Amino acid sequence: MSSDQTYVIVGASLAGAKAAETLREEGFDGRVVLVGAEEERPYERPPLSKEYLRGEAGREKLYVHDEGFYAEHDIELQLGRTAVSLDTASCEVELDAGERMRYDRLLLTTGAEPRRLEIPGADLDGVFYLRSVQDSDALRERIDGGGAVVVVGAGWIGAEAAASARQRGLDVTVIEPASVPLERVLGAEIGAIYRDIHADHGVRMLLGTGVEAFEGSGAVERVRTSDGRPIDCDFVVVGVGVQPRTRLAAEAGLAISNGILVDARLRANAPGVFAAGDVANAQHPFYGEPIRVEHWANALNQAPAAARNMLGQTVAYDRLPYFFSDQYDVGMEYSGYSRGCDRVVVRGDPAAREFIAFWLFDDRVMAGMNVNVWDVTDPIKQLIQERVAVNDRDLADPDVPLDRLARATSGRAA
Ligand SMILES: Cc1cc2nc3c(=O)[nH]c(=O)nc-3n(C[C@H](O)[C@H](O)[C@H](O)COP(=O)(O)OP(=O)(O)OC[C@H]3O[C@@H](n4cnc5c(N)ncnc54)[C@H](O)[C@@H]3O)c2cc1C
């Protein structure tokens, strides 16, 4: 492998760090530069709304690698540096201090950032967003002060932040325009189970209404809902989704559509440029269309695939989307992609919070979510990936082992 080459990775979080690690694992002995806007070495974000936010886990649990890892593997970690422009004709990246770096291969792992609410009072003190470890530190300090919090948005981040605040004994109100939490992914029926879980833990769920304004003098004191209700609070957490950080790529003329468009080998439409993780809208061989996944496992696994392709291997990234969430004592894993499903079949007991939900189209499982039921991800993925024909009765019956279902009819063509 030619040691005079420079591979630059922009975005030093989970995806960037795993790509750098993979380049070395695969024997690349050229220059590897990992540029990150944050001051912190690469860390994982899932604990930021869970155990780290609650003060149950320390910062050392967050990091992707030990402190010495980057030097030991001759990875040039440039922290607190932002890539401000990219010239794909001359193959150069410009950093904020004006330095220009030539690359032979470039990987963009610039991730995603929270959508901001632009409503009256948005700039008041006490309005928190949650993406970085600093955000989590600031929010934890505020949670430590107790009181009443309004969580705006009942997606994954909002739901987890609400659960953590409630677990720390705060008075929690969630405001969400949809009819149930997590409706976009789970639909009304399964989302209702999460509504009940939060309500059972004493969270006030204001559903079917949005937020019109934050009010207060200097700091937020109340939230005005779109149906005119004033909700008093000491602070607010906003979790209304994220958007891919595409500015650098867009200004360089790369194809952008809901993220950086890349093919199944994670290649963008410029020579030697790749993208992975939250920012990448990657052609998915199984679905036959581009999919952008904003979850931990995608950053973890897609970036190594990108690294291998940077090295000239041929790796199509075809893993099914997968994510997890923990709220109170309810843990879940979700595999697949439920778009276009025509029904949901449930196995187990939602009231006991131990069940598996399957989203189906026709006689095929498109997605599955196991809640407080473990070690079933492999057969669920197999049912989806191998397009196994199933019937609702077997799927709903806990006495029919999932791996038997997956094995019995696997291999059927689509
Ligand atoms: C609070 C929280 C909880 C989560 N919980 C879960 C969970 O339970 N389960 C799950 O599956 N997923 C979870 N996720 C999602 C998961 O953390 C993300 O999918 C993952 O972080 C994506 O990694 P990434 O490396 O692609 O991007 P990011 O983590 O967004 O990192 C991108 C990095 O690039 C840097 N950057 C951007 N532009 C530039 C530039 N021009 N120059 C230099 N650096 C730049 C950014 O500063 C950032 O550090 C959670 C996310 C958050 C925020």
Image (cartoon, rainbow, N blue to C red):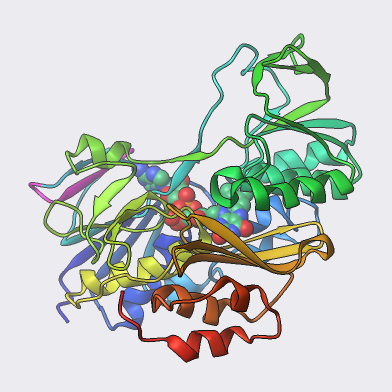
Instruction: Answer whether residue 148 is visible to the viewer in this image.
Output: yes
**Residue most extreme to the top:** 217
Going 20% across and 43% down the picture, which residue do you hit? 255
Number of numbered discs on residues:
0
> Which quadrant, please, contains the C terminus?
bottom left
Residue 113 pos. (x, y %): 48, 40
**Residue most extreme to the left:** 89
Looking at the picture, tell me which residue is in the foreground, 389 or 168. 389
Residue 178 pos. (x, y %): 63, 34
Going 63% across and 48% down the picture, which residue do you hit? 156
Query: Is the residue 211 above or below the residue 342 in the image?
Result: above
> Which quadrant, please, contains the N terminus?
bottom left
Residue 220 pos. (x, y %): 75, 18
Looking at the picture, tell me which residue is in the foreground, 67 or 199. 199
Instruction: Answer whether residue 45 is visible to the viewer in this image.
Output: no
* Drawn side of residue 155 relative to residue 319, left or right: right
Query: Is the residue 333 above or below the residue 405 in the image?
Result: above
Going 55% across and 50% down the picture, which residue do you hit? 185
> Is residue 346 magenta-colored?
no
Going 50% across and 76% down the picture, which residue do you hit? 390
Rendered image quadrant of residue 353: bottom right
Query: Is the residue 208 above or below the residue 213 in the image?
Result: below
Residue 122 pos. (x, y %): 62, 18
Q: In the image, which residues are magenta?
A: 89-96
* Drawn side of residue 234 relative to residue 118, left or right: right
Looking at the picture, tell me which residue is in the foreground, 94 or 145. 145
